Image: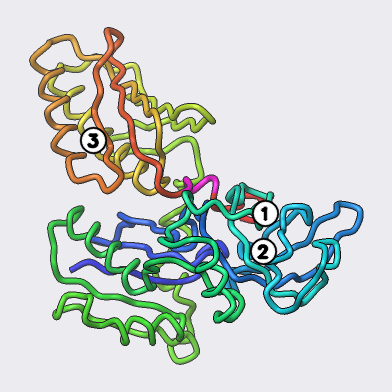
C-alpha cells in the first residue's frame, strides 16, 4: 500500500506520495501553468506611479493569486460591476475580467491583461458570450469549459503512484479540513479500496509534517549533491536551457564492468526519481560512469528505457553520445520544483 499525503508544504498545497517509507512523488497542486486562464477578479489596489492595478483572481491563492495589470490593458467593458468611460477610472473593489498573460516566476507576480486572447484559453465561445458569463459569476472564479476539482488532481497523483509502485491499494491523508471534505465528496473518483483519512494535529499532538519526516525526506531535492546507497553520488545542475546530471563513483575504483553497470543502474533509478520529484523538463543529459563494452552499454540503455516508459511527462530517451552521455527530453506541463519553491525561505 502507498500513501498520498496532501498538506501545505513550503507554502503550497502539495500531494506527496510515499512508498516503503520513501518519497516517490511530489505534485505541487497550485503550480500548474495558468497562462491563458481567464478569471473574474477583484482590484485590490492601484499603483499610480506604475499606472497599474494589482488584481486578486484566486481567493485562496495567497500571493500566488494576485497579478499585475497595466491599466492601459483593461478595456472598459471588462469592468463588470459598473459603467465607466475610461480604464483610468478603475479603482479598488472593481470586479474585472482578466487573463493571465505571463505566469508568475519566482518573485515576480503573474502579469494580467484585459485584452482577452480566446485562442490561448480553455473556452469555446465568442467575447460577447464570455462577458455575459462573467457578469453572472462571483469574483475569484475561473471561466473555463472544464475545470477539474482537487479530487481529480489527487486522483491523477494516485494514478501516477500506481504506475511507480505497481500497487493499487492506497491511503489518502490530509491535515486540511476543506481538502478532506472535498475528497469525501469526490469519493467516487478513487479506488473503492482507498482509505481517506483526516490527520487531526490537535488530537495527535504532532504536526503532520513531523509525523511523516517531510523535511528530512525531501531535503535532498534542493541540493546539488545526492548520495546513493552504494557510496556513489549524483551532481545535479539545473540551468535555464538544460539539466545536467553527473554520476560519480565516489572513489577511484578499479572494479569490473559488471560492478559499474550495476552502479549505473542504481544511479539511473535515483536520477529518474530526482527528475520526477524536481519536475525537470526540456533537455536532460546524464553522464554515467564509463562502460567499455557495447553489450553492457546496450543493457544499461534497455534498463533505462524500461525504467522511464510510464513517465507522466513523457521522458524520452534520445541517444548515447560517443562520450557516454545519455540524452533525454521531457515535456513541461508544470513548473520545476526550483521555480515553485522559494528556497530563500527554507
Q: Is residue 110 left or right of residue 86?
A: left
* Residue 210, visible in the rendered structure: no
Residue 109's disc is 1
SS at circle 2: strand
Range drawn in magenta? 335-339
Q: Look at mark 3 in the image and give the residue it sits on.
A: 266
In space, the residues marked 1 and 2 are separated at their CA atoms by 7 Å
Q: Look at mark 2 in the image and give the residue it sits on.
A: 66
Is 338 within the magenta? yes
Residue contact between numbered discs 1 and 2, judged by CB atoms under 8 Å:
yes
Could you classify mark 1 by the number of other residues whose Cα lies within 10 Å: few (under 14), some (14-19), or many (20 or more)?
some
Quarter of the image for residue 258 reads top left
* Residue 328, visible in the rendered structure: yes
Instruction: Indicate the position of residue 192 as horizontal and vertical percent values.
Output: 14, 80
Residue visible at 58% across and 50% down in the picture: 103
Choose between 198 and 192: the one closer to the eye.
192
| Quadrant holding the N terminus | bottom left
Could you classify mark 2 by the number of other residues whose Cα lies within 10 Å: few (under 14), some (14-19), or many (20 or more)?
many
Quarter of the image for residue 48 reads bottom right
In space, the residues marked 1 and 3 are separated at their CA atoms by 40 Å
- Is 242 placed above or below 30 here? above
| Quadrant holding the C terminus | bottom right
Amino acid at each position: 500500500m502507498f500513501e498520498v499525503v496532501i498538506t501545505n508544504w513550503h507554502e503550497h498545497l502539495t500531494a506527496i506520495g510515499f512508498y516503503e517509507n520513501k518519497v516517490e512523488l511530489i505534485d505541487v497542486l497550485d503550480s500548474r501553468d495558468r497562462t491563458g486562464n481567464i478569471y473574474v477578479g477583484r482590484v485590490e489596489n492601484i499603483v499610480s506611479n506604475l499606472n497599474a492595478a494589482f488584481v486578486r483572481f484566486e481567493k485562496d491563492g495567497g500571493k500566488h493569486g494576485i497579478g499585475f495589470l497595466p491599466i492601459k490593458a483593461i478595456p472598459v467593458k471588462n469592468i463588470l460591476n459598473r459603467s465607466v468611460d475610461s480604464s483610468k477610472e478603475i479603482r479598488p473593489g472593481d470586479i474585472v475580467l482578466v487573463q493571465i498573460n505571463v505566469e508568475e516566476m519566482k518573485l515576480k507576480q503573474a502579469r494580467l491583461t484585459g485584452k482577452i486572447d480566446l485562442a490561448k484559453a480553455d473556452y469555446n465561445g465568442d467575447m460577447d458570450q464570455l462577458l455575459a458569463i462573467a457578469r453572472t459569476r462571483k469574483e475569484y472564479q475561473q471561466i473555463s469549459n472544464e475545470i477539474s476539482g482537487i479530487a481529480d488532481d489527487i486522483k491523477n497523483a494516485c494514478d501516477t503512484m500506481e504506475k511507480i509502485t505497481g500497487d493499487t491499494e492506497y491511503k489518502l491523508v490530509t491535515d486540511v479540513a476543506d481538502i478532506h471534505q472535498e475528497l469525501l465528496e469526490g469519493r467516487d473518483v478513487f479506488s473503492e479500496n482507498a482509505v481517506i483519512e483526516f490527520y487531526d494535529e490537535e488530537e495527535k499532538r504532532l504536526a503532520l509534517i513531523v509525523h511523516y519526516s517531510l523535511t528530512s525526506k525531501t531535503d535532498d531535492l534542493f541540493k546539488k549533491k545526492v548520495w546513493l546507497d552504494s557510496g556513489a553520488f549524483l551532481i545535479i545542475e539545473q540551468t535555464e536551457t538544460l539539466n545536467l546530471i553527473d554520476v560519480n563513483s565516489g572513489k577511484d575504483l578499479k572494479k569490473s564492468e559488471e560492478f559499474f553497470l550495476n552502479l549505473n543502474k542504481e544511479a539511473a533509478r535515483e536520477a529518474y526519481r530526482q527528475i520526477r520529484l524536481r519536475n525537470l523538463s526540456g533537455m536532460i543529459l546524464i553522464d554515467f560512469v564509463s562502460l567499455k563494452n557495447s553489450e553492457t552499454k546496450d543493457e544499461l540503455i534497455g534498463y533505462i528505457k524500461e525504467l522511464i516508459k510510464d513517465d507522466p511527462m513523457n521522458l524520452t530517451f534520445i541517444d548515447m553520445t560517443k562520450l557516454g552521455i545519455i540524452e533525454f527530453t521531457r515535456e513541461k506541463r508544470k513548473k520545476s520544483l526550483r521555480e515553485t519553491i522559494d528556497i530563500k525561505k527554507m
